[in-house]
Image (cartoon, rainbow, N blue to C red):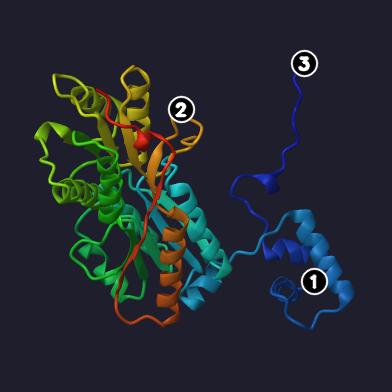
Amino acid sequence: MVTQTAHRPDNRYGNRPTMKDVAARAGVGLKTVSRVVNGEPGVTPDTERRVREAIDALGFRRNDSARVLRKGRTASIGLILEDLADPFYGPLSRAVEEVARAHGALLINGSSAEDPDREQELALALCARRVDGLVVIPAGDDHRYLEPEIKAGVATVFVDRPAGQIDADVVLSDNFGGARDGVAHLIAHGHRRIGFIGDMPRIHTAAERLRGYRTAMEDAGVPVEEAWMSLGATDPQRVRRAAEAMLSGPSPVTAIFTGNNRVTVTVVRVLAERTRPVALVGFDDIELADLLQPGVTVVAQDAARLGRTAAERLFRQLDGTLLLPERIELPTRLITRGSGELPPAG
């Protein structure tokens, strides 16, 4: 037996109800529907009731496209992240969204996947859709492609890493100081053979954290061996190889400083497989770090504050209250939980 379904042309995909449909159902003119939708006076209570009943019955939603074209603004901002799956960007994105919402703006976000070409494509696509501003975590090191958009009035703030080859507002964590403090903490607990495993060296944060590591070692008069440093992709296989190499041989490292949360997670797994205790301090906090044995000592960034500060700068640009670009550097915080306080073994 074949059951036939009644055809409902009014529910076809893309066939959204219009104000004309609302007017026909309510038995009023288009101007009356427009007044009700936009909250304008001049409509009797009975007529307004009929119009709203028609709106509810049809599932009508106002189309703001024409209003956008008249005003030249979309009341929306774009957020370009490195990786939507990275837990670091969750609180940052949420903070940007909260500030945008407080200003009556919609947030549209996307991921560059650490690809400069994709970053540029996404940024220009958002500008083509007439967003009012952009908050960008840059993947590339040349942002001159945004100069025409900025001159046209698109407010732009960079977060976590500075813009390349243009002057623009940037909000950063103190990557150098945080890494220096984390490594100095290991040195203070008796370590001299300390390994560093970080991200790609072209990335600003990775380079600054390596610089902090080197400076802490130099300040303590501890020579650094090349075998103790490894920068590259943060995929688990590469990080595992780097950690195992540092932990092997006649003079293995007694402590490791990891350059970001993804590296830290892999190193925690490597250390869990070994019997000899190895001290660990990671840059960026990780979920459940306090529940591990020992708990993971970290240099924590305030991701939410980064996002909130950047978004507030963006809306100050839009309000016309900012004149010159600024570099804002937020402090990090060392959280001791046990792994960074282990003494050297052997």
- Type of amino acid at the residue the image marks with label 2: Gln
Q: Which residue is mark 1?
A: 28
Give the position of the N terminus as an image quadrant: top right
Q: Is residue 142 left or right of residue 133?
A: left
Name the disc covering residue 1, or none.
Answer: 3
Name the disc covering residue 293, or none.
Answer: 2
Q: Tell me the SS state at disc 3.
A: loop
How far is the residue under mark 2 from the one under mark 3?
Answer: 64 Å
Instruction: Residue at 27% x, 34% y: name it.
Output: 256
User: Does 330 sit above or below residue 278?
Assistant: below
Of the residues under marks 2 and 3, which one precedes in the sequence? Answer: 3
Residue 97 % position (x, y): 52, 59
How far is the residue under mark 2 from the one under mark 1?
Answer: 71 Å
- Type of amino acid at the residue the image marks with label 1: Val
In front here: 261 or 51? 261
Of the residues under marks 1 and 3, which one precedes in the sequence? Answer: 3
Q: Is residue 19 left or right of residue 311?
A: right
Q: Is residue 120 visible?
A: no
Q: Tell me the SS state at disc 1.
A: loop
Give the position of the C terminus as an image quadrant: top left
Q: Tell me the SS state at disc 2.
A: loop
Residue 270 % position (x, y): 32, 23
